[in-house]
Image: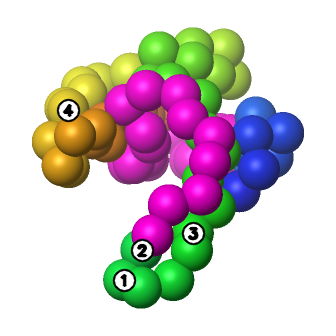
């Protein structure tokens, strides 16, 4: 995972790569979280915003949110965000 200061500029770049009519599927944390957890026997660092923040970042970069789905993962979960660039823009 990227430190929280990194995803915002990455979303901006990603939005620029989506061609008219194109789609992007982002898998983001459901809730904001920063910490270290055990992952397959090794420490893993996590630092992410909540899904509402990622939705706002995608739409502020001109992408249209098409759908989102919450996916349970133990006591927390992830959110799938499908966004697209309108054709002809």
Q: Nearer the viewer, mark 2 or mark 4?
A: 2
Disc 3 and disc 2: Cα gap in Å?
6 Å
Q: Residue at x 62, y 48 (%)?
A: 35
Tell me if label 1 and label 3 are in contact, CB under 8 Å.
no
Q: How many marks?
A: 4
Quadrant where the C terminus is found in the figure: top right
Q: Quadrant of residue 72?
A: top left
- Please name the residue that numbered disc 4 is placed on: 70
- Please name the residue that numbered disc 1 is placed on: 40
Whether residue 9 is visible to the viewer of this picture, yes or no, is no
Tell me if label 2 and label 1 are in contact, CB under 8 Å.
yes
Image spot of residue 43 (x, y percent): 57, 74
Q: Quadrant of residue 45?
A: bottom right
Q: Any magenta on residue 60?
A: no
- Please name the residue that numbered disc 3 is placed on: 44
Q: Is residue 66 above or below residue 20?
A: above
Disc 1 and disc 4: Cα gap in Å?
23 Å
Q: Secondary structure at mark 4?
A: strand
Image spot of residue 23 (x, y percent): 40, 45
Tell me if label 3 and label 2 are in contact, CB under 8 Å.
yes
Q: Residue at x 19, y 32 (%)?
A: 69
Disc 2 and disc 1: Cα gap in Å?
4 Å
> Which contiguous range is marked in magenta?
11-38
């Amino acid at each position: 995972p990227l430190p929280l200061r990194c995803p915002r500029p990455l979303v901006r770049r990603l939005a620029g790569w989506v061609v008219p009519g194109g789609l992007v599927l982002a898998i983001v944390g459901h809730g904001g979280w920063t910490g270290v957890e055990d992952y397959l026997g090794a420490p893993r660092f996590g630092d992410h915003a909540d899904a509402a923040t990622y939705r706002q970042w995608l739409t502020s970069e001109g992408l249209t949110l098409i759908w989102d789905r919450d996916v349970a993962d133990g006591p927390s979960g992830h959110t799938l965000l499908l966004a697209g660039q309108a054709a002809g823009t």
